[in-house]
Amino acid sequence: MKVLKFGGTSVGSAERFKNVAKIVIPAGKNIVVLSAMAGTTNSLLDITRCLREHDLSKAQNSIDTLRSKYEAVVEQLYTKTAFKQRAADFIKRTFDYLSSFSQDNFSDKQEKIIVAHGELISTYLFSTYLEEQGVRVCLIPALSFMYLDEQGEPDSDKIKELLHKLLSENADADLYITQGFICMNAGGEIDNLKRGGSDYTASLIGAAICADEIQIWTDIDGLHNNDPRIVDGTTALRHLYFEEAAELAYFGAKILHPTCILPAIKANVPVRLLNTMEPQALGTLIDNIFDPGTIKAVAAKDNIVAIQIKSSRMLLAYGFLRKVFEIFENYHTSIDMICTSEVGVSLTIDDTRHLDEIISDLKQYGTVNVDTDMCIICVAGDMHWSNRGFESRVMTALKDIPVRMVSYGGSNYNISILVREEDKAQTLKSLSKNLF
């Protein structure tokens, strides 16, 4: 059994729903994970923002606009009156319910309930359409098996137990449909896996059932060896090692959410990235088979801030780095890159919500310098230190570009370089020319 995940653009219209059906029906007895239709989650968040701001009129206008969008989808999607009426009734019930929320004492709990309806709508419409096509489809609600533990992390054991129970109870189905993104927390309330969560859902399900493969379907032809929006002549990657894919995902390869890869790595379930618009294309296969002696791809992560702390007290002192890291921990801010010397440490962050407080706290340990509008470039591949010349090829490509930081040796699968955002395009083009 495989897990097939389709993102918002893949189900962005009635025609797109039909295209997805053409992919999943002949593929066999699999589990299909759907995101909300493109634009829906943002619209629902706008509605919750209006309710928080006590603008009930604007919230209702947004609800009515979204209702009209789905009424049009229903009209275009179904041909048989009975199925069209069922879907229309569902849309009416759903949006009547959304209209019932009050602006008074609006809470995070209510926001998550509203936002969850994007996936609930898309899966109902799609499963009903499959029924119309004669498929014995089973809609298994994610809220019945996708649980978080008390630390807010997926409860893998509970997910596996409940999911296997649901599949066993509906063993005669031709196809299973469920929602991405949404889940239940340890308190029994509707929650979500944050943005990119549909990839995570698919990976968690794939790991739970030891799937033959997890397929992530988007409107992009797999991962490329560089950014095709900036660099001409990029090529789609046909194979990546799990660790290489994880590096690329974290450092800007937007086709794959970084968290998606983690359950798959643990369960040794291969992940394949495929294009909904070109279903016959090979896509990119990600698995645990390593290709030694190769440089695979380059990715970029924007909106980076570099922080440098210089202090003579760091010289021959123990505990200095611990004190620095504790400041970032106190503000729940993760660090991307780090480089150290005898009297200083440079690091980068992409979360600037507490930047002022972090800088203020760091100043008690030394002089602090901050560089904004920076970009991390990640070169992924076989970067083991014993491979002679690989790092020099990267640095040769950067001979005309001012480099703020280089991180090499922390991973066997990447070299990270920090440059100014204004130098990003030149850096990517130069790396492409020298490496590929």
Image (cartoon, grey):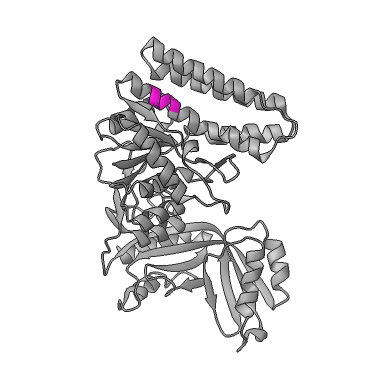
Residue nearest the observer in this picture, 73 or 401? 73
Q: Position of residue 280 (x, y in %)?
A: 24, 39
Task: Find the magenta span and give its range.
Answer: 124-128
- Asked if the stretch drawn in magenta spans residue 90, the answer is no
Q: Residue at x 46, y 53 (%)?
A: 259
Quadrant of the snapshot with the N terminus: top left
Q: Residue at x 51, y 72 (%)?
A: 405
Vertical comparison of 31 with 354: above or below: above
Q: Quadrant of residue 377?
A: bottom left
The part of the image, by quadrant, that contains residue 9 is: top left
Vertical position of residue 263 compared to residue 403: above or below: above
* Residue 424 % position (x, y): 47, 60
Residue at image point 56% right, 36% down: 42
- Horizontal side of residue 225 vs 161, given as left or right: left
Q: Kindly tell me whether residue 199 is visible in this rendering.
A: no
> Height in image: 24 above or below 94?
below
Q: Quadrant of the C terminus?
A: bottom left
Q: How many marks?
A: 0
Residue 249, image quadrant: bottom left
Q: Give coordinates of residue 224: x percent, y percent.
A: 34, 53
Q: Nearer the viewer, residue 117 or 207?
A: 207
**Residue 331 image point, x, y percent:** 66, 61
Q: Magenta region's main secondary structure?
A: helix
Instruction: Check the image and report above or below for 34 versus 226.
Output: above
Question: What residue do we see at 63% from left, 60% from top?
Answer: 332
Residue 126 in view of the camera: yes
Q: Residue extending furthest top?
A: 81
Instruction: Describe residue 271's horizontal placement relative to residue 342 as left or right.
Output: left
Name the residue furthest bottom.
Answer: 316
